[in-house]
Image: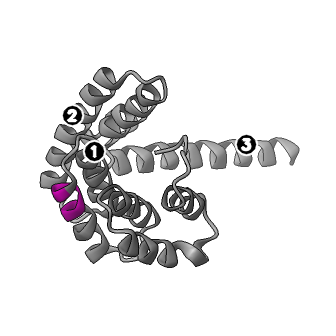
Amino acid sequence: MLNEKISMIKNLFFSLLISLILNVNAFAAGSSDSGSSKTRTQYDMAVTHIKAAKKFEEKNNLKNAKKRYEKAKKLLIQSNKKFPNKANTLNYLGFTTRKLGDFENGEKYYLQGLAIEPNHVGINEYLGELYVATNRHNLAVERLEILESCNCEEYNQLKAVIAGEKVSKY
């Protein structure tokens, strides 16, 4: 009797294991946006470049920061062509474009992202920072008001930028 139960449990375990393996493989093969765990998307690679660029900026190594932002922007443009209308992609496109000094096109990307996701926390913060950098304080305050109820770090970051405080995060 005990041997039969152990045998049933083993069979059940192996059936579940095989089912899990088949489902994982089917998911990886059918996933178009994120790919398998071994395949990094252009968006993922861009985010890696952005993180590196921010670290270079913190060390005042602006030349290397700029190179990383340029690489990230190219990857994001490709990602946006492949998977259009993703608010996160447009957020980072706006961010990298702004960091490279092109405020006009950075703003366009942010506004495209907000058209898709009006309460996107990152876009509202970064667009507010762009407004501060382009001397449009009233528009920055509008972005801050949108973030006011989010109970998030982005609200505090934008508030500090509007107040003229130096912030360590970008």
Residue beneath disc 2: 70
Amino acid type indicated by mark 3: Ser
Q: Position of residue 44 (x, y in %)?
A: 34, 40
Report if residue 40 is visible in the image: no
Q: Which of marks 1 and 3 is nearer the N terminus?
A: 3
From the viewer's perspective, is 48 left or right of 167? left
Task: Point out the frontmost of discs 3 and 2.
Answer: 2
Q: Where is residue 72 in the image (x, y as percent from the top left)?
A: 26, 37
Considering the numbered disc 1 on the image, is that residue within a helix, a strand or a loop? helix
Considering the numbered disc 2 on the image, is that residue within a helix, a strand or a loop? helix
Q: Earlier in the sequence, mark 3 or mark 2?
A: 3
The answer to if 107 sits in the magenta stretch is yes
Res 135 → quadrant: bottom left
Vertical position of residue 63 compared to residue 115: above or below: above
Amino acid type indicated by mark 1: Thr
The answer for how far apart the CA atoms under marks 1 and 2 are is: 7 Å
Q: Residue at x 25, y 51 (%)?
A: 93
Q: Residue at x 29, y 43 (%)?
A: 99
Amino acid type indicated by mark 2: Glu
For this rendering, which residue is in front, 30 or 109?
A: 109
Q: What stretch is highlighted in magenta?
A: 104-109
The answer for how far apart the CA atoms under marks 3 and 2 are is: 60 Å
Residue located farthest toward the right when viewing the structure as drawn: 2
Residues at badges 1 and 2 in contact (C-beta under 8 Å)?
Answer: yes
From the viewer's perspective, is 104 left or right of 39? left
Residue beneath disc 3: 7
